[in-house]
């Protein structure tokens, strides 16, 4: 096992290495330049020549560093040179932990093949496929299969893929997000597949974080691999997180997280597009309902949605059709809950009756290439340091910059310490690596407290549950429409809006804008500074979305209340009573009262 570090002195020359110097086929370099990709990233500079030489490699590089192309390009070149395959089984397997990643990698391969005008066939396998669909997909056979380990082992156990043919045909096996493959419970699937992998097969292991699982996989799959570490020092923080991601935190109570999130977004103190991570689907819907009362539209990406709805939401968000996406990163909790539930239910019902509501292959953190996300917000802190790294790795990808803001409540402090020590921040000079967010002042937060607390009160558990059920109904209908529609119009993104209003009543318009008098001078300056710095970096502010359609209520400016409202009975100061939805929404019309 060899460790490879960039040691030679001609780093500068290498820095500008184009793809031609790496020995890539001109069809591939032309394809990359058509995609506007000219300069190789460090992981690509190191990995591509070694893979072209036929070496097994373990590539550990930070999130967003281009690992996908680092293995796709040499893999395609190898298959190009093998020529049209007459083999009885696929030549290459790319194994990934989630269905979303399958889709993403498969579309990357398709796009490269299209540009190269090479007629290799790539397919993806997912757990929701019927056996007949699997048979159809694997007929031929295809040259490249992108799949989760579970689907490959199912197709072998069901005889759709012959183990003997794999032994004769497989020339490349790639495990992407390798450390997650085992923690997602794919160990048995991998072991059953690996027993059929021929010795001559070239195996690649890619991940941004290392773990004992990766070590386990190395022993299982690789032969005398080259271990690629791509950082100046083992403990450099850049090793796993791009240095172009500025990491901030806001300490607040769990109850004030919605208020702080509202202040960040409403006072425009963070740059769009914004990806908000939560640990549960309920919290995702609570945030969505809360924000839409203030005219901030979003979508919730979660495991309950039909798969093509999830993919369509990702495509719409990447296409910039909406600016805020709430992603439920419940990978750890979901698997644990599912196992607990199955164990509890098993005593009463047989396993086969368990309807698995939640898609076990769902995952929106690892490897998903969200386009142009400038800000990642950890509304709930992740359960592991690796989870944090992959979440904030959704921004600052390739050569872009990004910002992460974590809302940390007193019970979440230790995960911050765990993260700092994992990233080698424990020594003093690096203790400022995750710093308090400087643009949000206490007065700015307090200025929105009344409104936020009023609205938060009406976003009850029942409202969340109802909207969650409503969303499922909408998306199942959409999903059927989507399926039919996409068959005929694959490129159409306009068909469905996933960020449409979820509340039963149209939000009151006065909550949409923050009145001038509520925003202190410092905050105004900060917001202006942010816009100027983005403009200086050539990042256009995301265009304003068209105003929300007027609901049943007539929207009016809170400061110009009607005579009837001016005469409305005012409650003596301090006298609180249970507000209903409409009164809470009218509260803003008292204008000065809030200041
Ligand atoms: N050489 C390059 N120059 C510019 N952009 C690139 C280059 N290589 C890849 N990219 C782009 O960078 C983004 C991130 O690439 P990729 O998803 O492969 O990163 P990754 O290392 O796999 O990230 P993760 O750890 O999240 O899986 C993608 O949008 C990709 O198209």
Image (cartoon, helix red, strand yellow):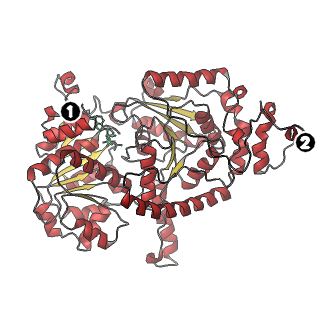
Q: Quadrant of residue 84?
A: bottom left
Spot the residue most to the front: 488
Residue closer to the observer: 179 or 511? 511
Position of the C terminus, as image quadrant, is top right
- Please state if 87 lies on the left or on the right of 379 as rendered: left
Mark number, residue 5? 1
- Please state if 449 lies on the left or on the right of 578 as rendered: left
- Give me the residue at 50% from left, 21% from top: 532
Ligand number 1: quarter of image: top left
Q: Quadrant of residue 169?
A: bottom left
Residue closer to the observer: 448 or 252? 448
- Please state if 578 lies on the left or on the right of 243 as rendered: right
Mark number, residue 164? none
Mark number, residue 569? 2
Tell me where residue 111 appears, x and y as whole percent.
Answer: 27, 47
Secondary structure of the residue carrying tag 2 is: loop
Foreground mark, 1 or 2, reads 2
At label 1, counting other C-alpha atoms closer than 10 Å, the crowd grade (few under 14, some 14-19, many 20 or more) is some
Residue closer to the observer: 466 or 233? 466
- Give me the residue at 27% from left, 28% from top: 232
Q: CA distance from mark 1 to mark 2?
A: 74 Å
Tell me where residue 479 appears, x and y as whole percent.
Answer: 46, 61
């Amino acid at each position: 096992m060899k460790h490879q570090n960039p040691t030679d002195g001609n780093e500068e020359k290498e820095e500008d290495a184009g793809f031609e110097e790496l020995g890539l086929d001109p069809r591939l370099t032309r394809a990359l330049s058509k995609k506007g990709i000219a300069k190789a990233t460090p992981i690509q500079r190191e990995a591509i020549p070694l893979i072209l030489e036929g070496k097994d490699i373990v590539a550990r590089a930070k999130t967003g560093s281009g690992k996908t192309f680092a293995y796709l390009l040499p893999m395609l070149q190898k298959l190009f040179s093998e020529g049209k395959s007459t083999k009885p089984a696929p030549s290459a397997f790319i194994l990934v932990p989630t269905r979303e990643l399958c889709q993403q990698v498969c579309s990357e391969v398709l796009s490269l093949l299209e540009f190269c005008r090479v007629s290799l066939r790539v397919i993806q396998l997912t757990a929701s496929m019927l056996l007949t669909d699997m048979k159809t997909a694997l007929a031929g056979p295809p040259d490249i299969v992108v799949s989760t380990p579970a689907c490959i082992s199912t197709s072998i156990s069901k005889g759709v893929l012959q183990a003997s043919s794999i032994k004769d045909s497989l020339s490349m096996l790639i495990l992407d997000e390798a450390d997650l493959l085992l923690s997602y419970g794919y160990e048995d699937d991998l072991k059953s597949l690996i027993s059929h992998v021929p010795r001559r097969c070239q195996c690649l292991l890619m991940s941004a974080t290392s773990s004992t699982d990766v070590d386990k996989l190395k022993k299982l799959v690789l032969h005398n691999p080259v271990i690629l570490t791509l950082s100046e020092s083992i403990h450099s923080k850049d090793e796993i997180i791009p240095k172009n991601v500025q990491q901030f935190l806001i300490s607040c109570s769990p109850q004030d997280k919605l208020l702080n999130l509202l202040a960040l977004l409403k006072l425009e103190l963070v740059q769009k597009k914004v990806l908000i991570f939560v640990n549960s689907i309920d919290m995702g819907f609570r945030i969505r309902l809360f924000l839409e009362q203030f005219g901030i539209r979003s979508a919730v990406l979660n495991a309950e949605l039909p798969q093509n709805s999830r993919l369509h939401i990702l495509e719409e968000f990447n296409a910039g059709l909406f600016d805020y996406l709430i992603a439920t990163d419940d990978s750890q909790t979901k698997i644990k809950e599912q196992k607990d539930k199955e164990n509890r239910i098993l005593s009463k019902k047989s396993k086969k009756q368990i309807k698995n509501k939640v898609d076990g292959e769902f995952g929106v953190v690892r490897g998903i290439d969200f386009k142009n996300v400038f800000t990642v917000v950890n509304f709930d802190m992740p359960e592991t340091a690796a989870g944090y790294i992959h979440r904030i790795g959704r921004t600052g990808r390739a050569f872009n910059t990004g910002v992460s803001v974590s809302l940390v409540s007193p019970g979440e402090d230790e995960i911050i310490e765990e993260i700092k020590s994992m990233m080698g921040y424990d020594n003093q000079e690096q203790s400022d690596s995750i710093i308090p967010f400087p643009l949000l002042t206490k007065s700015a937060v307090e200025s929105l407290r009344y409104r936020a607390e009023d609205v938060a009160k009406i976003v009850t558990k029942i409202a969340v549950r109802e909207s969650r059920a409503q969303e499922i109904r909408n998306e199942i209908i959409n999903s059927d429409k989507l399926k039919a529609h996409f068959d005929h119009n694959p490129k159409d993104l306009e068909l469905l809006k996933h960020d449409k209003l979820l509340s039963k009543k149209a939000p009151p318009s006065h909550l949409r804008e923050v009145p001038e008098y509520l925003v202190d001078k410092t905050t105004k300056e900060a917001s202006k500074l942010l816009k100027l710095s983005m403009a200086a970096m050539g990042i256009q502010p995301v265009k304003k979305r068209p105003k929300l359609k007027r609901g049943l209520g007539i929207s009016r400016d809170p400061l110009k209340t009607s005579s009837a409202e001016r005469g409305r009975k005012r409650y003596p100061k301090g006298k609180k009573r249970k507000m209903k939805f409409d009164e809470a929404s009218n509260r803003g019309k008292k204008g000065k009262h809030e200041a």
